[in-house]
Amino acid sequence: MEIERKFIINNPPDDLESYPHHYISQGYISTEPVVRIRKRDEEYILTIKSKGLMARTEIEKPLTKNEFEELIPMVKGNLIEKVRYLIPEKNGLTIEMDVFKGIFEGLIMAEVEFPDIETAEGYIPPAYFSEDVTNNPEYQNSALSQKSII
């Protein structure tokens, strides 16, 4: 079970490059149910997600580079490109801050994953977080993959 909240970031920390980060390229073979392929640095992953906004089932399976490349032609919509920064947060949590590239250049979002719904609902984000878009399906990456602009 994946339990996360998602936020728009208008003013990210100045020291982003000091945090561990990954280069991500991902595409959606299906948006309902979500079937995603992702390249994270040199790792390849197939992900299947159920419907939902804050909480949903998520299954990930490794892919080979060759399998990933064979699936790329099946991607519907945009290939999403982003750099994901991993920022330590209070209570052992991690902020995953995505700085989008390409078609969504300028969009910055942060996700925080939680061990349970109660912790997610009680979370108080840092002051630099802007709008909470957890319950806005337009900001799910699968929805973004079908848009030309946000």
Image: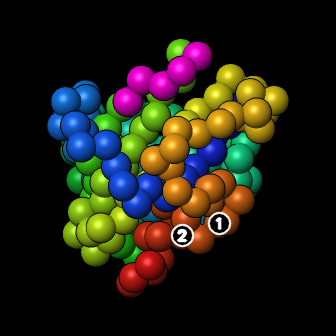
Q: Residue sitting at 68 percent across and 34 percent down? A: 123
The residue tagged 2 is 143
Position above or below: 29 against 114: below
Quadrant position of the N terminus in the picture: top right
Residue 124 lies, in percent from the top left, at 65, 36
Residue reaching furthest to the bottom: 148
Q: Quadrant of residue 145?
A: bottom left
> Where is mark 1, residue-wise?
137
Distance in Å between CA atoms under marks 2 and 1: 7 Å
Residue placed furthest toward the front: 127
The stretch in magenta equals 87-91
Q: Quadrant of residue 90?
A: top right
100 to 89, vertically: above or below? below
For the residue marked with disc 2, what is the amino acid? Ala
Report whether 73 appears left or right of 93.
Answer: left
**134 or 91: nearer the viewer:** 91
Is there any visible trace of residue 68 in the rendered image?
A: no
Q: Residue at x 35, y 31 (%)?
A: 86
Dots 2, 1 in contact, CB < 8 A: yes
Residue at the farthest right position: 118
Residue 118 at x, y percent in the picture:
81, 29
Closer to the camera, 124 or 110?
124
Badge 1 marks a residue whose secondary structure is helix
Q: Left of 100 or right of it: where is 47?
A: right
- What x and y, as percent, mark residue 6? 57, 50
Amino acid type at circle 1 is Pro
Q: Nearer the viewer, mark 2 or mark 1?
A: 1
Nearest to the observer: residue 133 or residue 146 = 133
Query: Regarding mark 2 in the picture, which secondary structure is present there?
Result: helix
**Can you give x and y, in whole percent of width and height, for residue 119 in the image?**
74, 27
Query: Pointer 1: residues within 10 angstroms few (<14), some, or many (20+)?
Result: few
Q: Quadrant of the C terminus?
A: bottom left
